[in-house]
Image (cartoon, rainbow, N blue to C red):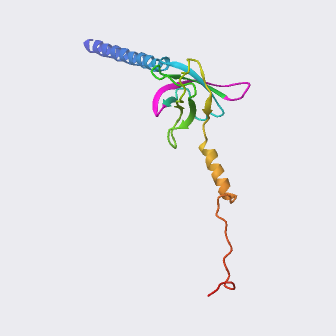
């Protein structure tokens, strides 16, 4: 009987530890999204950008994407994202969706402008550039080469008749 009690006690302790770890993980992940202030931007394409994707200034992560939806009037992708309170962005800042390497995920790169006024919480970033699809770039390149646009033009060779010795 004594061995069964020890096994039950160990099982209860392990179960409590797993539950505690799950609760802490959920609280820790929610804490990251709650910090900072929210900004909005409208893009023509957000291919590969997901909720939770990074928002970076000068390559440093300062926030994350919190929401995406299609504007029913303009058919553009409206994105909401947080930026940490320690980063105050000028009103003429721009937002570009870029890739984290050839096969990496997408993120929003913010290029701060030079204006003296700062974007208020809830403001719209007006200067944006959507994501560029690698497949579209490659297909444009392949079709332009196939159509001879980038191929060097052949010049007729000089015949021996007009050449002077």
Image quadrant holding the C terminus, namely bottom right
Query: Can you give x and y, in whole percent of width and height, for residue 102 in the image?
Result: 52, 44
Query: Which residue is drawn at the image coordinates 25% and 12% (left, top)?
Result: 2
- In-front residue for pair 32/118: 118
In the figure, 102 relative to 7: above or below? below
Query: Can you give x and y, in whole percent of width and height, for residue 90 in the image?
Result: 54, 25
- In-front residue for pair 113/69: 113
Query: Which residue is drawn at the image coordinates 59% and 44% (left, top)?
Result: 134
Please provide the residue range marked out in magenta.
57-76
Judge from the rendering whether residue 140 lies leftward or rightward of residue 112; answer left or right: right
Query: Which residue is drawn at the image coordinates 50% and 29% (left, top)?
Result: 54
Instruction: Answer with the quarter of the image where residue 77 lies.
Output: top right
Q: Is residue 64 magenta?
A: yes
Q: Main secondary structure of the magenta part?
A: strand
Q: Can residue 49 be seen in this snapshot?
A: no
Judge from the rendering whether residue 59 lies leftward or rightward of residue 141; answer left or right: left
Query: Which residue is drawn at the image coordinates 66% and 33% (left, top)?
Result: 44
Farthest front residue?
A: 116
Query: Can you give x and y, in whole percent of width and height, for residue 74 in the image?
Result: 72, 27
Q: Is residue 130 magenta?
A: no
Farthest right residue?
A: 73
Q: Can residue 64 be seen in this snapshot?
A: yes
Farthest left residue?
A: 2
Image quadrant holding the N terminus, namely top left
Q: How many marks?
A: 0
């Amino acid at each position: 009987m004594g061995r069964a009690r020890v096994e039950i006690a160990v099982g209860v302790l392990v179960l409590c530890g797993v539950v505690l770890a799950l609760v802490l993980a959920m609280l820790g992940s929610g804490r990251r999204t709650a910090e900072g202030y929210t900004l909005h931007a409208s893009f023509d394409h957000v291919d590969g950008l997901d909720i939770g994707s990074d928002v970076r200034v000068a390559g440093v992560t300062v926030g994350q994407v919190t929401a995406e939806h299609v504007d029913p009037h303009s058919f553009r992708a409206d994105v909401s994202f947080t930026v940490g309170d320690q980063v105050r962005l000028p009103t003429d800042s721009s937002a570009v969706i870029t890739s984290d390497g050839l096969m990496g995920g997408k993120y929003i790169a913010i290029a701060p402008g030079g204006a003296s006024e700062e974007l208020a919480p809830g403001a719209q970033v007006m200067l944006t550039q959507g994501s560029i699809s690698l497949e579209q770039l490659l297909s444009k390149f392949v079709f332009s080469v196939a159509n001879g646009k980038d191929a060097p033009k052949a010049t007729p060779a000089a015949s021996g008749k007009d050449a002077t010795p």
